[in-house]
Image (spheres, rainbow, N blue to C red):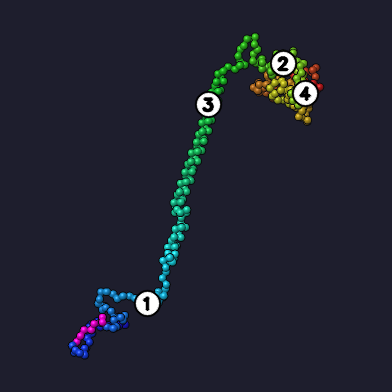
Amino acid sequence: MATQFDTSPEVVHNPSDHLPQVYDAGNSPHSGYPYASYTSPSSDVPPPFERNDSHSQNRTPLSDKEAAQDPAPASAAVSEREKKSRICGCPVIVFILITALIVAVAAVIGLAAATGVAVKKSNDSDAKLNALRESYAASSNTPAAATVTVTSSAPASTEVDEEELTSGCSNKKDTTTGTVYTSKFMNKAKFTFYCNTNAPNDPIFSIFATNLNGCIEACNAWNSYNTTEKTCEGVSFVPFWARIGNAATNNAPGDCYLKPGPQDRDGLEDAKGTHAALLKN
């Protein structure tokens, strides 16, 4: 139970005066006591609260430096969560948006570059195609030399072609027959021309040699490289079939036919438009 104090004035009897006197508590020698200045409960000012905590009284206050280095645990946890939720100093959502934007820009640039290359190639192809069309149109409007009509004083180009194809058998058969052709390759084999004749025996091989000289070179090459088949001792060349269209119409497998032996001049067959050459022993 709280102690009750009487706040009414005290009366002191003065030995020298029998009249009552008012006691002044402020001048009392006991005014320094804890309850010397106690105020009546009816006062509006509450009494001061003094905490007598020996633990708090014995605790040494922190210096300013220690206080700055010792943040509150809650603030440290919040700061750590904020660091984890950031990438390169940016919030995660901002970093994701920036990355997506960079990828989209790179894709657009790559697509534009690829489209430009494709358009350039297409334009180049169109230009080449147009050039080919113009070249073909110009050549088709120019008459071919082989179809030009000439006077009898100058040989037609077809006659010149035939002479080159047949090594002279087409228009100089009498002077060409019996002449010798020496191969330009391998063992330099020699062959004798016989115009308007066909070497007998079934061919061992057929090719498109283009001309009589090429047919002879094919026969010589056959003998130089082949070691399992018969020896080529003669050739039969058909200049009309040197043109692929003519050969295809006649189902001819070539214009040059390599013939095995034996071959000699007496065994040759008369054949107009075919020219033979026999290997000299």
Give yes or no for contact between labels 3 and 4 (Cβ–Cβ under 8 Å). no
Residue 202 position by quadrant: top right
Gap in angstroms between the C-alphas marked 3 and 4? 50 Å
Label located before the other in sequence (3 or 2): 3
User: Does 124 sit above or below residue 111?
Assistant: above
Residue 48 falls in image quadrant: bottom left
In the rendered structure, does residue 95 fall within the stretch colored magenta? no
**Residue type at tag 4:** Ala
Picture residue at 55% right of the left edge, 23% below the top: 135
Residue marked by disc 2: 169
Residue 240 image position (x, y, % from top left): 68, 19
The x, y position of residue 108, in whole percent, is 47, 41
Report the label total. Answer: 4
Q: Nearer the viewer, residue 125 or 55?
A: 55
> Residue at label 1?
52
Q: Which residue is mark 4?
A: 189
> As shown in the figure, which amino acid type bears the numbered disc 1?
Asn
Which residue type carries mark 3? Asn
Q: Is residue 141 visible?
A: yes
**Dot 3, how many residues are within 10 Å of its Cα: few (below 14), some (14-19), or many (20+)?**
few
Q: Earlier in the sequence, mark 1 or mark 4?
A: 1
Residue at image point 41% right, 70% down: 61
Task: Provide residue 125's location: percent of width, then percent of height.
Answer: 53, 30
Residue with the mark numbered 3: 130
Sequence-first disc among 2 and 1: 1
